[in-house]
Image: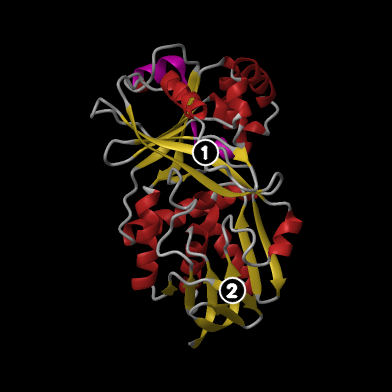
């Protein structure tokens, strides 16, 4: 079967869906092709956390702000609940508070609010573990959706309401100028965007290999509080996040914190562990995560990594009797120096890979840039 279309998008993860959305907004005819019946990769194995604060200063932060705005527009249209808004970064060490103060002084921190120790306890003591906290930072920017449901709802809305065509359980065997060869036939396409996620071998393997991309494997879990009334005020991060997220870690003030963490929590850093906790409408917390870099990610999860993540959770949040109800691993494409890659194998073809695990946070803005690169600025 042959069909002609303005744009073929290869891949129906969040990055591919973002490109289909922006293309339909431009009035382009779109076919999305994916080998799976539904999203099962990084797009649904994450926090559903649209993270702005802490993203690297410059393009990444700007993309996150823009993508957050698009999420806010499309989520109600697609029937996607926003589970909660905002981010609370809790500082357990004086060095962490210094980083937050330095961040607040940047342009990125302009709309954020520093919280002293007394106010933190007054406003959030019900969720905080016993122990000393130096204070924190509240960001109003973040949004959280339940990714395991939101990605499917977004795809269904793009298909049914915006008119994009989806071809599921279909493998793309080749992408050539003017056409895409699939197991369901040939699609004639004016332009093509390939969003392969961490599939680094099926399409353009030589180009991808030359980029130096590998994979990152991470541990995550779902934790059910024993207290059914436990509610986070928003997403939660801690000191370890401040040496992982580039918007904080690239500040000069982060160096003393890193040195102290290396001395006190070196095993956490060695496993790429920091705390993110978000909450769903059922009360369950999605908690993670860790980072291990492997071309072929091991399928075997070490219990010690989960123990460390739970230690950080329990040092931060008051969750006596909480139970882990699900555990899983995710993988995503990773590059040691680049947060995303847009490559042009041909003037009419773009290869787009988010290499930092920030697809939910930045993909909509990246898609706008891709379509501008392919078609020029939108009217």
Q: Quadrant of residue 201?
A: bottom right
Residue at the image point whose x is 55% and y is 63% from the top: 367
Q: Quadrant of residue 191?
A: bottom right
Q: Is residue 27 visible?
A: no
Question: Considering the image in quadrants, where does the C terminus appear?
Answer: bottom right
Residue at the limit of the structure toward the left, as seen here: 228
Q: Are marks 2 and 1 in contact (CB under 8 Å)?
A: no
In the rendered structure, which segment of residues is drawn in magenta? 105-123
Q: Percent from the top left, x then y, of residue 246?
A: 63, 37
Q: Residues within 10 Å of mark 2 (few under 14, many from 20)?
A: few
| Mark earlier in primary sequence (2, 1) | 2
Mark 2 vs mark 1, CA separation in Å: 30 Å
SS for callout 1 = loop
Looking at the picture, tell me which residue is in the foreground, 186 or 135: 186
Q: Quadrant of residue 143?
A: top left
Q: Residues within 10 Å of mark 1 (few under 14, many from 20)?
A: few
Mark 2 lies on residue: 173
Residue at the image point whose x is 50% and y is 16% from the top: 134
Would residue 66 appear left or right of 86 to someone viewing this image?
right
Would residue 88 appear left or right of 256 to someone viewing this image?
left
Image height check: is 268 above or below 190? above
SS for callout 2 = strand
Would residue 312 appear left or right of 159 to someone viewing this image?
right
Looking at the picture, tell me which residue is in the foreground, 80 or 200: 200
- Residue 122 drawn in magenta: yes
The nearer-to-camera label among 2 and 1 is 1
Image height check: is 74 above or below 255? below
Looking at the picture, tell me which residue is in the foreground, 22 or 360: 360
Say the numbered circle drawn on residue 300.
Answer: 1
Residue at the limit of the structure toward the front, as seen here: 300
Residue at the image point whose x is 30% and y is 21% from the top: 321
């Amino acid at each position: 079967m042959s069909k002609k279309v303005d744009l073929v998008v290869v891949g129906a993860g969040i990055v591919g869906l973002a490109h289909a959305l922006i293309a339909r907004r431009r009035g382009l005819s779109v076919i999305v092709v994916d080998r799976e019946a539904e999203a099962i990769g990084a797009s649904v194995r994450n926090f559903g956390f649209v993270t702005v604060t802490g993203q690297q200063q410059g393009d990444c932060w700007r993309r996150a702000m823009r993508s957050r705005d698009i999420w806010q527009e499309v989520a109600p249209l697609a029937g996607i609940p926003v589970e909660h808004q905002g981010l609370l970064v809790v500082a357990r060490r004086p060095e962490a508070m210094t980083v937050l103060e330095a961040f607040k002084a940047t342009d990125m921190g302009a709309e954020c609010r520093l919280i002293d120790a007394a106010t933190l306890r007054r406003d959030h003591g019900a969720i905080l573990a016993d122990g000393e906290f130096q204070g924190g930072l509240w960001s109003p920017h973040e949004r959280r959706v339940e990714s395991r449901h939101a990605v499917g709802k977004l795809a269904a809305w793009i298909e049914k309401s915006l008119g994009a065509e989806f071809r599921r359980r279909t493998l793309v065997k080749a992408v050539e100028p003017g056409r895409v060869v699939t197991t369901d036939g040939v699609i004639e396409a004016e332009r093509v965007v390939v969003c392969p996620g961490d599939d680094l071998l099926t399409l353009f393997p030589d180009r991808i290999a030359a980029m130096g991309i590998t994979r990152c494997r991470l541990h995550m879990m779902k934790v059910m509080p024993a207290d059914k009334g436990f509610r986070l005020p928003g997403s939660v991060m801690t000191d370890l996040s401040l040496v992982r997220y580039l918007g904080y870690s690239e500040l000069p003030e982060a160096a003393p914190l890193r040195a102290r963490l290396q001395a006190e929590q070196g095993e956490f850093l060695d496993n790429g562990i920091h705390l993110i906790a978000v909450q769903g409408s059922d009360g369950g917390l999605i908690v993670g995560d860790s980072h291990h870099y492997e071309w072929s990610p091991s399928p075997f999860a070490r219990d010690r990594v989960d123990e460390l993540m739970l230690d950080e959770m329990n040092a931060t949040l008051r969750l006596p009797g909480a139970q882990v109800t699900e555990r899983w691993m995710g993988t995503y494409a990773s590059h040691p120096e680049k947060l995303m890659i847009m490559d042009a194998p041909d003037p009419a073809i773009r290869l787009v890979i988010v290499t930092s695990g920030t697809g939910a946070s930045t993909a909509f803005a990246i898609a706008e840039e891709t379509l501008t690169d392919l078609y020029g600025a939108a009217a």
